[in-house]
Amino acid sequence: LYLIPEGLDFSNGVLIFGFLLALSLELIYLCSPSFAKKKIESIDFDKAKGHTISYTGCMSLFLIVCILVQQGQLYGYKISDDERFNMTIEEKGFRYRAKFMTEITLYCLTLLLSVFLTLNHLMSVNRKRADYSKKYKELKG
């Protein structure tokens, strides 16, 4: 895929592809007519099936956990000045590359999280609006 830069590892390539896929799904949701939005919302969260959390909410929670794990890994790359002076150039290069890949992964996870949180919020607002308009119609007439 030409949208993924060279030099990234496989996991970052998958995350970028997942981000592009999630972004395209969000654009499809935003551009779809109201009956298609209702169908997508019912797939995401269906009270009749006993769902307690939406699929976009589950994905958001999963991404938050992944971000926390990546933050822990990023914290593990810190070394003291004494260790830094005793490292060879190859060890420093390896450390900087590993830290860079962890930061890129963290950035990709944050992008994915923003898309899924936006989708979750949009679908939640639309579901509540439909529920309130249904209740209003029942009270009105």
Image: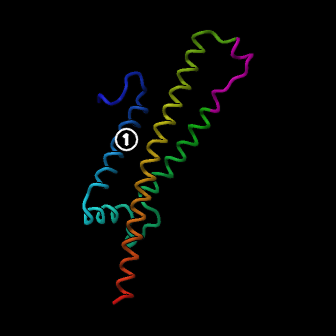
Comparing 56 with 3, the one in front is 3
Residue 109: x %, y % from top left: 48, 40
Query: What quarter of the picture does the C terminus occupy?
Result: bottom left
Amino acid type of the residue that numbered disc 1 sits on in the rendered structure? Gly
In the image, residue 7 lies in the stretch drawn in magenta: no
* Residue position marked by numbered label 1 in the rendering: 18
Residue 16: x %, y % from top left: 39, 36
Residue at the limit of the structure toward the bottom, as seen here? 141
Comparing 74 with 23, the one in front is 23
Q: Residue at x 36, y 72 (%)?
A: 130
Quadrant assignment, res 51 = bottom left
Quadrant assignment, res 8 = top left
Quadrant assignment, res 50 = bottom left
Using residue 4 as the reference point, say whether residue 78 is left or right of it. right
| Above or below: residue 65 compared with residue 74 | below
* Chain part drawn in magenta: 75-85
- Per the image, label 1 sits on a secondary structure element best described as helix
Q: Residue at x 43, y 61 (%)?
A: 54
